[in-house]
Image (tube, rainbow, N blue to C red):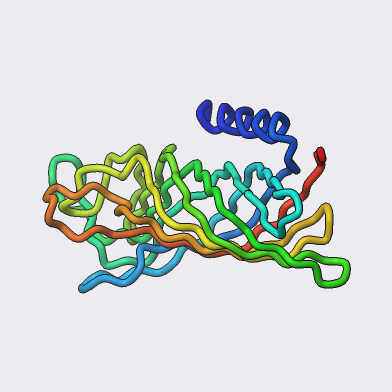
């Protein structure tokens, strides 16, 4: 959590010095690990919250935007076998929620339609792991990486990937839809040749800008 608040503070300072819009953002997203052979999972929902900043390029309909948000990743209702550090099987994973501090930065194209501004674009993200909660079907719950899927040695501490966003702004409120796909896997496997389970997420956020400098 100390890292989270440090990032929030740093991001707010960046917004002030860069003379950008600065505000808060909250929303809801669904996350999963995609579709893989012999692996069955369902998406899990999580609330996200953080700060956002946005800078408009002068005389151009382009915006450089970014966020620092707490955005968990994971999946539910899987047939993935879990085991402890000693290799003892514990059963199928019913839920694995992994906390991440996510920092997406993206370029948006915007156009005015009456009293609103429509925006859409893409960029990249990096996410830093904070903790996790794993539940076994009909069993106990574990955390701190003590129980993992079979053949996985640890949770990936840093995810990175691509981020898409589209939304509408009625200043000072902005509503956006987003989708992200990691380039690396949610876990570090025991074997380097093992399949990577890439994290996906999509959802909706509401932003509110309360600092604006021109």
**Above-or-below relation of 7 to 29:** above
Q: Is residue 153 above or below residue 115?
A: above
Return the residue nearer the eye: 167 or 122: 122
Q: Is residue 166 left or right of residue 90?
A: right
Asked if residue 120 is positioned above or below residue 156 in the image, the reply reads below
> Which residue occupies the extreme right position in the image?
115
Q: Which residue is nearer to you in this view: 192 or 167? A: 167
- Residue placed most toward the observer, 4 or 98: 4
Give the percent coordinates (x, y) of residue 17.
70, 29
Classify residue 214 by image quadrant.
top right
The structure residue drawn at horizontal position 32% and vertical position 56%, both measured from the top left corner, is 136
Number of on-image labels? 0
Residue 13, image x and y in percent? 67, 28
| Residue 91 percent coordinates (x, y) | 23, 58
Tell me residue 153's x, y (percent). Answer: 20, 44
Question: Residue at 41% across / 40% down in the picture?
Answer: 129
Q: Identify which residue is drawn at 65% across, 32% down.
A: 14
Vertical order, 21 against 1 (above or below): below
Q: Nearer the viewer, residue 63 or 87?
A: 63
Query: Residue drawn at (38%, 56%), measured in percent from left and top?
Result: 182
In the displayed structure image, the side of residue 49 where residue 112 appears, left or right: right
């Amino acid at each position: 959590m100390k890292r989270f608040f440090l990032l929030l503070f740093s991001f707010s300072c960046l917004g002030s010095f860069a003379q950008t819009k600065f505000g808060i953002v909250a929303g809801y997203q669904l996350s999963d690990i995609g579709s893989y052979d012999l692996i069955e999972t369902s998406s899990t929902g999580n609330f996200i919250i953080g700060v956002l900043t946005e800078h408009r390029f002068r005389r151009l309909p382009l915006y450089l935007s970014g966020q620092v948000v707490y955005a968990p990743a994971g999946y539910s209702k899987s047939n993935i076998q879990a085991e402890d550090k000693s290799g003892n099987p514990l059963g199928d994973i019913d839920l694995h929620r992994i906390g991440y501090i996510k920092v997406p930065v993206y370029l948006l194209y915007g156009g005015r339609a009456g009293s609103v501004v429509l925006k859409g674009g893409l960029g990249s993200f990096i996410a830093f792991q904070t903790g996790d909660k794993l539940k076994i079907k009909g069993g106990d719950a574990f955390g701190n990486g003590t129980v993992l899927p079979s053949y996985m040695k640890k949770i990936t501490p840093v995810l990175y990937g691509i981020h898409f966003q589209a939304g509408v702004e009625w200043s000072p409120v902005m509503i956006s839809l987003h989708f992200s796909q990691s380039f690396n896997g949610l876990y570090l496997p025991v074997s380097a040749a093992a399949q990577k389970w890439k994290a996906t997420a999509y959802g909706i956020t509401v932003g509110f800008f309360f600092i604006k400098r021109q």
